[in-house]
Image (cartoon, grey):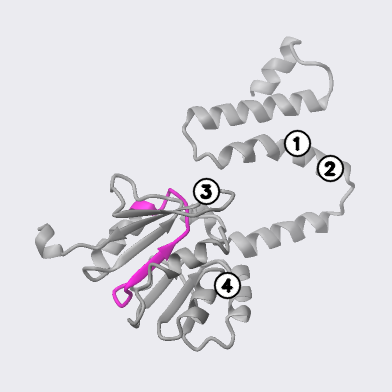
Amino acid sequence: MAAFVLGRSGLLPAGLWPLAAAQALAAAAVAGALRSDRWWLPMHLAFLPLLLLSQGLGLPPLAYLAAFIVLLVFYWTSFRTQAPLYLTNRRTVPAVARLLPAGRALSVLDIGSGTGSLIRPLARQRPDCRFCGVETAPGPWLLGRLLARGLPNLRWLRDDLFAIPWADYDVVYAFLSPAPMAAVWDKANRELRPGALLVSNSFAVPERAADFIVDIDDRRGTRLYGYRIGDRQAAN
């Protein structure tokens, strides 16, 4: 609508690309005004220009169907969970490993584990511990299952992270998005044992101060937020 108004006003140069640029900028500005998550801004800026570029490539209709299927397989219910596919990088793995006390057999759950980029190396480092990775999207889940072969202490599930019980785990790791973190904290408080640990990569629990923060020395400035589950009777 904004691009249409600008085009009719004569303020834009002639041609399709100035119109597309104006529409992209307007969409990003509206998203910013509505306080959308930051990752929406580059999506709004890039969507229409990329669409125009794809039309100029002369791709057959099946190419668009194939691209849709690939996105569906890898992002599946992201529209519902509001958690896109994030993969834990290699520098974060040793930092999480240091949070697991040595000499104690722990149960560790990775919710939204993608291809298992965190849980697989942890399972190799700590054969004394029991690990479980949960992923909803079929593409990352299948790849993770193939890569996890030969790890007897790693259970690999394709399921809803909120549907499975968490009560048997000592540590829950999440790398999701800001949107589900309040629900994650609520489930952790209801189901985890006192003394259990919730670790969130990059996204803090809203309105709850972290018990500790670990900064990772990587290019994106990864930060781990740690939350200890307290005694429910004491809290009451």
Magenta residue check for 9: no
Of badges 3 and 2, the one in the foreground is 3
Of 196 and 39, nearer the camera is 196
Please name the residue shown 56% across and 69% down the image. Answer: 117
Residue 43 x/y as whole percent = 63, 41
Of 90 and 23, nearer the camera is 90
Of badges 3 and 1, the one in the foreground is 3
Residue 211 x/y as whole percent = 29, 54
Q: CA distance from mark 2 to mark 4?
A: 32 Å
Please name the residue shown 49% across and 37% down the image. Answer: 36
Mark 3: which amino acid?
A: Gly
Residue range corresponding to the magenta coloring? 166-182
Q: CA distance from mark 2 to mark 1?
A: 10 Å
- Density class for disc 4 (Cα within 10 Å; few <14, some 14-19, many ≥20) is many
Q: CA distance from mark 4 to mark 1?
A: 32 Å
Mark 2 residue element: helix
Of badges 2 and 1, the one in the foreground is 1
- Density class for disc 1 (Cα within 10 Å; few <14, some 14-19, many ≥20) is some
Q: Which residue is mark 2?
A: 55
Mark 1: which amino acid?
A: Pro
Q: Which residue is mark 1?
A: 49
Badge number at residue 221: 3
Residue 99 x/y as whole percent = 38, 67
Labels 3 and 2: the sequence-earlier one: 2
Q: Which residue is mark 4?
A: 141
Mark 2: which amino acid?
A: Gln
Mark 1 residue element: helix
Mark 3 residue element: loop
Of badges 4 and 3, the one in the foreground is 3
